[in-house]
Image (tube, rainbow, N blue to C red):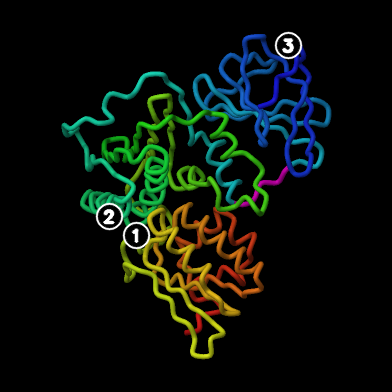
Amino acid sequence: MTEPPSAGKAAATARVDGGRLALRGWGWRDHARADWTSAGLVLRSEVLLRVPQPRPGEFAWHREGRTRLGLLGVGARELFAFGFGHGGYRPPPGQRRVLAAILAGRFRFTRVGVAEPELGRGECQTGELLHTWVGPDQLGEARERLTRALRSAGAAADVRWRVAVAANEALTNAAKFSGGGYLTARLGPGGLEVSVGDRGRGVELGRLASVLLAPREARGIGRQQGYWLMLTHSDFCLVTSGPWGTTVRLRYGSIQTLPGGEPPTGPGKGGQTVEFQVMPSADGRHTVVICPGELDYQKADRFRELLQQCDTPAVTVDFTRVRLVDSTGVGALVEAIRKLQAAGVQVRVTNVVPEVYEILEVMGLVEVFGRRVIVAAGGAGAPVA
């Protein structure tokens, strides 16, 4: 964290330095607090800007000479500020989708000091489809239970898949940082709400801003991108956090099929296998690793280990059965691809179904590694057994 400049200064200047944004010259009152991140400056409620502050979900530009400073309302008392100097920063496609969701008012953050009383309650609530505790070794089971509950409620296949992807990321964070959390799904007149609450240390707005807004260089993909999937796979995402923990609420206005969308197969389908299959060729020059139906937090370490053990000149990762991959699985895939490529191994990820391909696009893998490495189902380069 960098010390803020002296109070009283109002001019703001920004420059791009080595792909990172640098802001200087902000003015605020003496009691104000601010966090400096690689994305710019995250402003607290005490900050008094000499420009109008946007309401939650609204976006405004402030100009200072050749500098454009973006102000983005996040909550009733919180906002993001980030700068685009001469030359600017062009976010990758996935991050542009994240920013578009924020600008559309589909994300809000609230910091509160008192725990939410309903987190660990036992009684059933009106319109409730599911309420259960989910531990680190129960993520797959929780996704299946959630999918079954949504199917019973009449939710379309594409909606079930979007919910599973987004809720899984919130559950994974709860497993990593709090040893688990409560999963709740409710269906009411306003639509569907799926919430995940934990008793961890909470998340700071500055940290969240860095995850969402920080410039993503190629080497940064596959890291800390769970919130990207929460925002891009929900209609609205509300994060409430404090020293008592964090609750993520994912809202969906309709449980019917999206206009123009083709229902995906969804998690838990498509011939899911329990374990990975490793198939070396007879001549010892090629290895095929066939992945199970879900590549998630529970399977990421095993997946990483298997790929790093491959010692043939060519390796194909067959995604034929994969119907869900989360940010942890993507991180393991990115790490393995880079290590294998550095060792001179030719790597391809093939037979990627459309809904999983979309996730890999959001996370930046398609842009960084190219379509010859990340091959869609039906594309050229089928795996060789």
Q: Position of residue 262 (x, y in %)?
A: 41, 62
> Looking at the picture, does residue 288 appear above or below residue 193?
below
> Looking at the picture, does residue 159 appear above or below residue 372?
above
> Cα distance, mark 3 to mark 2?
54 Å
The residue labelled by disc 1 is 267
Point 71% across, 32% down: residue: 83
Point 16% across, 31% down: residue: 123
Left/right of residue 202 with respect to residue 47 in the rendered view: left
Split into 4 quadrants, where in the image is the N terminus?
top right
Left/right of residue 333 with respect to residue 249 in the rendered view: right
What segment carries the magenta color? 89-93
Give amino acid for label 2: Glu
Point 24% across, 41% down: residue: 132
The residue labelled by disc 3 is 7
Sequence order check, earlier mark of 1 and 2:
2
- Name the element at disc 3: loop
Give amino acid for label 3: Ala
The residue labelled by disc 2 is 144
Q: Are marks 3 and 1 in contact (CB under 8 Å)?
A: no
Q: Position of residue 137 (x, y in %)?
A: 31, 51
